């Protein structure tokens, strides 16, 4: 099977010669090639220049036996296009100029001509897709409504996203309206990425795990389904990633996605029991990549054995990390992980 065939077969939950592998944040600061590009170009410039975006998206594919590419972009492109003013300061997380704390702030979000301001994302997908020419699978992505809401209210990164979570309780109507605006933007962006050549779209709900089951059901599932149902109508699969989402597995039955990307604390065995028909992806600990090559190889082999032993076997399983690769990750560990997965092909 070639790489793209394998990736498409896994997405379709059909038999594979071995599970495909790609890694969240595979094109990032742990790669010297990425750092070299960033030494000369700003982050948004890389995102907005198809040649640069493609160049950094290809970096990991040239080094490691990965089966899929992910477009180089960011989840925060959506609040940026709505007018939040997002910057990435050196060594820090994202910083928003305009935060969402009131109805008046929401009224300032500019949805007119949104897709014109976001056209660089599908343009990057198209350029990458043409360059790959079918050699690898290709993922598009966007943030999920709650995680984009959380950044927009907080105005940047946070351990607890307290302003955002407080707003769910204090002003649920405002939170709902904001997430619905985000959901509609996500639909437009995701559909444009799929039309530009993405094989699937991943929705990153990185901070969804901060919520209780009841909160996720009440506040997040409605806007998430508003977005996911329309993306799925394209006929291509939608995958949802939640960090720390173990307690939400049973809620995910109610979410209209094809696949779930597990964090490192949720095993495939537990997830398969809760979600017998979903595409599952994950869930090696990004910190494992700091444990030395031999540990990486052993743990990867153990994961592949676990997939083979699932009811239904490794159909509908994609090997990935349980969260994004960390900046200081040794490239040799990434190579070892990919080699162990590739070694499973007959
Ligand atoms: O290979 C890839 O996956 C690259 C594409 C990609 C980026 N961000 C590029 C990026 C993807 C899929 C993302 C997703 C993303 N962005 C998420 C969801 C995944 C996760 O990690 O939970 C989130 C929460 C963000 C928001 C974000 N963007 C943060 C918090 C930061 C700064 C700190 C950090 O983690 O890097 C960014 C900036 C960013 N996005 C960088 C990259 C490579 C680093 C920017 C730089 O070069 O300095």
Image (tube, rainbow, N blue to C red):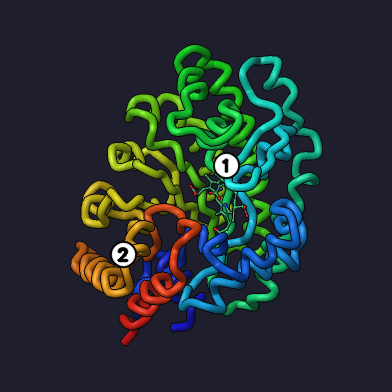
Q: Residue at x 64, y 51 (%)?
A: 191
Q: Residue 290 or 101: which is nearer the viewer?
A: 290
Distance from mark 2 CB to nearest ligand 1 atom below 8 Å: no
User: Which quarter shows the C terminus?
Assistant: bottom left
Judging by the rendered image, the residue that carries numbered circle 2 is 291
Residue 62, given in percent of the width and then of the height, sits at 56, 78
Is residue 242 left or right of 42 when viewed as pictured?
left
Q: Residue at x 65, y 43 (%)?
A: 89
* Residue contact at pointers 1 and 2, CB within 8 angstroms: no
Q: Residue 77: name its quadrant.
A: top right
Distance from mark 1 CB to nearest ligand 1 atom below 8 Å: yes
How busy is the neighbourhood of tag 1: few (under 14 within 10 Å), some, or many (20 plus)?
A: few
Residue 214 visible somewhere in the drawing: yes
User: Which quarter shows the N terminus?
Assistant: bottom left
Q: Residue at x 38, y 79 (%)?
A: 339
Q: Residue 222 or 128: which is nearer the viewer?
A: 128
Q: Mark number for residue 93?
A: 1
Residue 220, given in percent of the width and then of the height, sits at 46, 31
- Mark closest to the chain's N terminus, 1 or 2: 1
Q: Residue 235 or 287: which is nearer the viewer?
A: 287
Residue 313 visible somewhere in the drawing: no
Q: Residue 288: name its quadrant.
A: bottom left
Image vertical order of residue 5 relative to residue 148, above or below = below
Residue 128, given in percent of the width and then of the height, sits at 67, 68
């Amino acid at each position: 099977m070639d790489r793209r065939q394998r990736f498409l077969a896994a997405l379709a939950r059909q038999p594979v010669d071995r599970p495909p592998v790609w890694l969240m944040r595979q094109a990032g600061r742990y790669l010297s090639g990425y750092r070299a590009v960033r030494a000369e170009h700003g982050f948004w410039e890389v995102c907005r220049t198809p040649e640069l975006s493609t160049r950094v998206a290809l970096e990991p594919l040239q080094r490691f036996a990965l089966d899929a590419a992910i477009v180089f972009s960011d989840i925060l492109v959506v609040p940026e296009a709505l007018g939040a003013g997002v910057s990435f300061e050196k060594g820090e997380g994202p910083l928003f100029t305009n935060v969402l704390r009131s109805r008046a702030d929401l009224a300032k979000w500019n949805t007119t001509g949104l897709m014109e301001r976001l056209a660089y994302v599908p343009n990057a997908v198209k350029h990458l897709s043409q360059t790959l020419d079918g050699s690898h699978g290709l993922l598009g992505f966007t943030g999920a409504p709650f995680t984009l809401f959380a950044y927009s209210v907080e105005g940047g990164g946070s351990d607890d996203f307290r302003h955002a979570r407080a707003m769910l309780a204090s002003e649920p109507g405002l939170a709902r309206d904001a997430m619905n605006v985000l959901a509609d933007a996500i639909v437009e962006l995701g559909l444009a990425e799929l039309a530009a050549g993405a094989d699937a779209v991943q929705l990153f709900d990185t901070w969804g795990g901060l919520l209780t089951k009841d909160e996720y059901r009440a506040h997040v599932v409605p806007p998430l389904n508003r977005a996911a149902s329309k993306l799925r109508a394209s006929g291509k699969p939608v995958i949802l990633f939640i960090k720390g989402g173990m307690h939400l597995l049973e809620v995910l039955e109610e979410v209209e996605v094809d696949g779930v990307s597990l964090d490192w604390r949720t095993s495939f065995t537990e997830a398969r029991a809760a979600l017998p028909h979903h595409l599952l992806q994950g869930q090696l600990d990004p910190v494992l990549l700091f444990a030395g090559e031999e540990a990486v190889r052993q743990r990867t082999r153990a994961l592949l054995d676990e997939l083979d032993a699932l009811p239904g076997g490794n159909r509908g399983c994609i090997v990935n990390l349980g969260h994004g690769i960390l900046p200081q990750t040794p490239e040799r560990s990434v190579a070892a992980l990919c080699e162990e997965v590739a070694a499973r092909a007959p």
